[in-house]
Image (spheres, grey):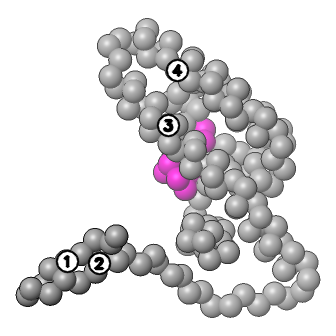
C-alpha cells in the first residue's frame, strides 16, 4: 500500500524518494590518507547514533522540565536523568577512542546547535561544566569545539550525509 494522489480522475501512486548525494570522487595522495578516510567513516558510523541519542535525550528532558511546577522538582528530575544517562552511556563512552570522543563532541554540536560545554552548563551547572572542560583539556580536547561543515569539517559532513542516507 502506498499513498495515492487523484488527478483529473486518474489515481497516481505517490512515493517519496530519498535524497541521493553525489560528490566528486575522492583522490587520495597515499595509502595513509585513504586509511584515515575509512577510519573517519568507521568513527562517524559509531558516534553519529550516540550524538542523535544525546539530542533526543536533551529535547525530551527539556520538554518534560517545562511541565514541572517548580525549580526543586526540575532539579530532582535533572539528577535522575543525569544518573540514568550515566548508567546507560558510561560503558559505551568508555569504549570510544580519543578520536571518536573528539568527533562525538563535534557531532553533538552538529545535532544540537550547541556546544557540549553549553549543554553541560545548562543541565548540570557551570561548576560541572568547568570541571569537564578542564578534564577534557588535560587530554587535548575541548567541549567548546564547534562543527564547521563548510570549512574544517567538510569531509566529516560529507561522510555524515552519506552515512545518514545509507550510501556508505
SS class of the residue under badge 4? helix
Q: Which residue is mark 2?
A: 14
Disc marking residue 80: none
Q: Nearer the viewer, mark 1 or mark 4?
A: 1
SS class of the residue under badge 3? helix
Residue drawn 61% across the image and 49% down it: 51
On the rendered image, what quadrant is the N terminus found in? Answer: bottom left
Return the disc, 4 or 3, that comes first in the chain's sequence.
3
Name the residue furthest left: 8
Quarter of the image for residue 31 reads bottom right
Within the magenta stretch, is there residue 109?
yes
Q: Residue 126 versus residue 18: which sits nearer the camera?
A: 18
Q: Are marks 2 and 1 in contact (CB under 8 Å)?
A: yes
Q: Which residue is mark 3?
A: 58
Return the disc, 1 or 4, that comes first in the chain's sequence.
1
Q: Is residue 128 left or right of residue 39?
A: left
Query: Which stretch is magenta?
Result: 108-117
SS class of the residue under badge 1? strand
Residue drawn 24% across the image and 75% down it: 4
Q: Can residue 150 be seen by looking at this rendering? A: yes
Amino acid at each position: 500500500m502506498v499513498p495515492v494522489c487523484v488527478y483529473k480522475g486518474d489515481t497516481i501512486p505517490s512515493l517519496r524518494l530519498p535524497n541521493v548525494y553525489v560528490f566528486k570522487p575522492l583522490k587520495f595522495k597515499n595509502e595513509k590518507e585513504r586509511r584515515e578516510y575509512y577510519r573517519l567513516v568507521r568513527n562517524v558510523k559509531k558516534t553519529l547514533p550516540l550524538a542523535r541519542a544525546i539530542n533526543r535525550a536533551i529535547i525530551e528532558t527539556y520538554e518534560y522540565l517545562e511541565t514541572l511546577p517548580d525549580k526543586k522538582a526540575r532539579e530532582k528530575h535533572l539528577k535522575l536523568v543525569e544518573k540514568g544517562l550515566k548508567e546507560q552511556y558510561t560503558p559505551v563512552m568508555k569504549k570510544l577512542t580519543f578520536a571518536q570522543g573528539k568527533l562525538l563532541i563535534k557531532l553533538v554540536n552538529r545535532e544540537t546547535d550547541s556546544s557540549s560545554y553549553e549543554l553541560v552548563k545548562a543541565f548540570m551547572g557551570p561548576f560541572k561544566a568547568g570541571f569537564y572542560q578542564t578534564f577534557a583539556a588535560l587530554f587535548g580536547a575541548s567541549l567548546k569545539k564547534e562543527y564547521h561543515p563548510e570549512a574544517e569539517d567538510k569531509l566529516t559532513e560529507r561522510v555524515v550525509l552519506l552515512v545518514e542516507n545509507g550510501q556508505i
